[in-house]
Amino acid sequence: MTDIQLYNTATRRKERFTPIDHENVRMYVCGPTVYDRAHIGNARPVIVFDVLFRLLRHVYGPDHVTYVRNFTDVDDKINARAAETGRSIREITDETTRWYLEDMAALGTLEPTKMPRATDWIGAMISMIEGLIEEGHAYEAEGHVLFRVRSYKEYGALSGRSVDDMIAGARVEVAPYKEDPMDFVLWKPSTPDLPGWESPWGRGRPGWHIECSAMSYELLGAEFDIHGGGNDLTFPHHENEIAQSKCSGHGFARVWMHNEMLQVEGKKMSKSLGNFFTVRDLLNQGFPGEVIRFVFLSTHYRKPMDWTAEKAEAAKEELTKWRTATDEVEPGKIDTRVVDALANDLNTHGAVTVLRELFKTGDNSGLKASAALLGLLTDALRFDYQKHHVIFGTAAQFNLTVHPASISLVSSEVSEMIERLLDERAEARKAKDFARADALRDGFAAAGVLIKDTPDGVEWELAPDFDPAKLEALK
C-alpha cells in the first residue's frame, strides 16, 4: 500500500498517515459562509483537499473514505446581505450554495461525501452546548452562552500562542457579560428580525465555531482522521473547535492540515487594489477550470500561491502542447513518480514536474497515462478514465478551452455548427444586416461560445458554461 506522508500543523512535522480505521477513513474541511460568490482564494482549499480526497480514495478505495465539508448558512454576514438587498435569508443562502457548487465543479472538484448545512444541525449544537455547561466549560450570561477558554489548559497549542499573549497582542471584544476577554460565544440571542431557534437560553442562534464541532461529531464520530482548511482558520476558528470538542470528551481530529494563502499579481487580494476576482470572474474571462486548477496545483499547498495572468496564459499554452503531443496516442504505463509525489504531503508541484519531464523526453504515452492519473487532461487526451483510478479529476468534470488548432476536442457537429454561424455572421456584417450580426454575437455569448476577431480571422473557444441548446436556437 502507498505510504502517505502528511504535514500535521498540530505537531509541526510531516508524519506517516495511519488512519484510525482503514475501512473508514474520515476527513472534515471547513466550508464557505454562503452570502456571495466564492473568490479565488476560497477555491484553493477546495482544490487542495479534493486532491487529498482523491489520493485517499485511490489508496483505500472509494467506498472507504468519507469527506465532509459544511455550509455556514447562519451568520451575521448573511443577515447583513439580506437587510441590504431586501431578499430572504433562505433565498440568498440557497442561491449562493448553488453558485458555489457550480463554480467548484467547473474547477474539476468532486463533491464531498456529505455537505451539511449548519441550520439543519441546530439541535446537535444545542446539545453540545448543554454538555459544556454541565461540565463547567461554558456559562450563560445575558442570553449568551460563552466558552470558558481557561478551562481548557491546552488552548493555543495548535496556533502556538498562550492565552495571555493573545490578550496582549490582539484586539479582543470585551463584552461586560464575559468572565474573561478570551471567552467566545457559543450561543447568542436573536431579535425578531433575525434567524432564531428556541433553546434553554431563549430564542437565539449559534456562534460560528460550534457548528463544525457538532457536525463533525454527528457525521464522523468523536474522533476522525483529518481536519483541513486555510491557514487563516488556525486561530481562532480551529483553536476554538478543538477546545469545544476536547471538553466535550471527544478525541476530535488527529491530523490538522492548512493550506497557505493566495495572492494576485504579488499582492494580497483586495477590492481596493482592484485585484479581487471570484472564480466565476475568471471562468467568464475565458480561463477554463482546467487552467485555473493547473495554476493552483503547480504550487505546493503549504507555500503562498501567486495568481498572475502570465501564469494562467502559460498554463493554457502548456496544456495545449500536451494535448497536441498525446493526440491519438495510446496510454502507456503510469509513472509511479506521480503517485509518489502526491503521497509526499500532496506535492502536486512534483507531480506536474514529472509530467514536464515526460513531455521533454518525448514519452507521450507515459505523459498521457500519468496525466490521466492526475486527471488534469483526461478529456483532451481521450483517456478511458473508467479503467484507471483518477486522483486529480475525471474527464466529465473538466471544461476544456477549444481553439481552431484543437477543434477535434469537440464533436464535429458542434464545431461545424459554430463555423456555419460564424460564416453567417460575417455575411450579415458584409450585407450591413447589423441586427442579425448583433443577434448572433449575443447568441454566441449566451451559449457560452467566446468569439474573438483577429487580423488572421475569427477565433473561438467554449466557455465553462457552454450550452449546446442555446447554440441550436441560433440556427
Image (tube, rainbow, N blue to C red):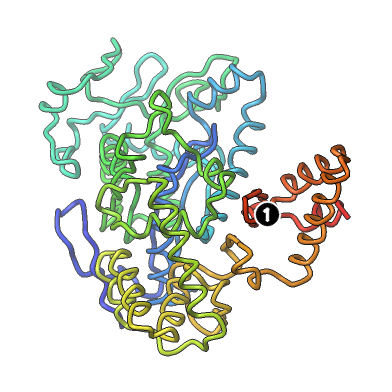
Residue farthest to the top, as pictured = 176
Q: Nearer the viewer, residue 129 or 375?
A: 375
Q: In this rendering, does residue 301 appear at all?
A: yes
Secondary structure under tag 1 reads strand
Horizontally, is 262 left or right of 391 in the view? left
Residue with the mark numbered 1: 458
Q: How many marks?
A: 1
Please identify the quarter of the rendering in which residue 269 is found: top left
Q: Amino acid at mark 1?
A: Val
Quarter of the image that includes the C terminus: bottom right
Q: Residues within 10 Å of mark 1 (few under 14, many from 20)?
A: some
Identify which residue, 190 or 380, lies in the foreground. 380
User: Which residue occupies 60% across, 35% down?
Assistant: 93
Residue 272 x, y percent position in the rendering:
40, 23
Q: On the image, which quarter does residue 333 sit in?
A: bottom left
Q: Observer-nearest residue: 396 or 472?
A: 472
